[in-house]
Image (tube, rainbow, N blue to C red):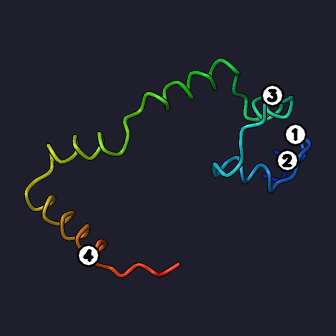
């Protein structure tokens, strides 16, 4: 991370935030430098973004998964969800 930050000319904290989705992707030459360091073309990056945007959401994923799970697996998931919902939530 430090090496990438040095090559790009920004802080390693910023690179870490980018990698963990806690920072917006810069629309500057910094972004171009990041792509170059990781050897990713703008076109390849754009395609990955489009593919990610087309990925199914959590609800769709769960609905599909439940169709192929065994009764035992469904029961286990139901038990886990019930335990989660019954766990007292800390008051804010």
The mark lying in front, picked from 4 and 2, is 4
What residue do we see at 79% from left, 51% from top? 14
| 26 lies left or right of 79 | right
The mark lying in front, picked from 4 and 3, is 4
Q: Residue 53: percent from the left, percent from the top?
A: 49, 30
Q: Which element type, helix, strand or loop, lies under badge 4?
A: helix
To which residue does mark 4 refer?
A: 83
What residue do we see at 64% from left, 52% from top? 20
- Packing grade of label 3 (10 A; few <14, some 14-19, many >=20) is some
To which residue does mark 2 refer?
A: 5
Q: Residue 32: percent from the left, percent from the top?
A: 81, 28
In primary-sequence order, the first of circles 3 and 2 is 2
Q: Would you say the residues marked 1 and 2 are in contact, meaning their CB atoms lie under 8 Å apart? A: yes
In primary-sequence order, the first of circles 4 and 2 is 2
Classify residue 30 by image quadrant: top right
Residue projecting furthest to the left: 71
Q: Which element type, helix, strand or loop, lies under badge 1?
A: helix
- Packing grade of label 4 (10 A; few <14, some 14-19, many >=20) is few
Q: Which element type, helix, strand or loop, lies under badge 2?
A: helix
Classify residue 48 by image quadrant: top right
Q: Which element type, helix, strand or loop, lies under badge 3?
A: helix
Classify residue 41 by image quadrant: top right
Front-most of residues 38 and 27: 27
- Packing grade of label 2 (10 A; few <14, some 14-19, many >=20) is some
What residue do we see at 77% from left, 49% from top? 15
To which residue does mark 3 refer?
A: 32
To which residue does mark 1 refer?
A: 8
Front-most of residues 49 and 86: 86
| 28 lies left or right of 75 | right
């Amino acid at each position: 991370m430090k090496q990438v930050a040095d090559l790009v000319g920004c802080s390693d904290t910023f690179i870490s935030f980018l990698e963990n989705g806690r920072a917006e992707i810069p629309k500057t030459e910094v972004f171009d430098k990041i792509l170059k360091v990781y050897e990713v073309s703008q076109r390849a990056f754009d395609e990955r973004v489009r593919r990610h945007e087309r990925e199914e959401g959590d609800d769709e994923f769960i609905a599909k998964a439940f169709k192929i799970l065994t009764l035992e697996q469904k029961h286990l998931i139901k038990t886990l969800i019930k335990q989660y919902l019954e766990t007292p939530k800390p008051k804010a």
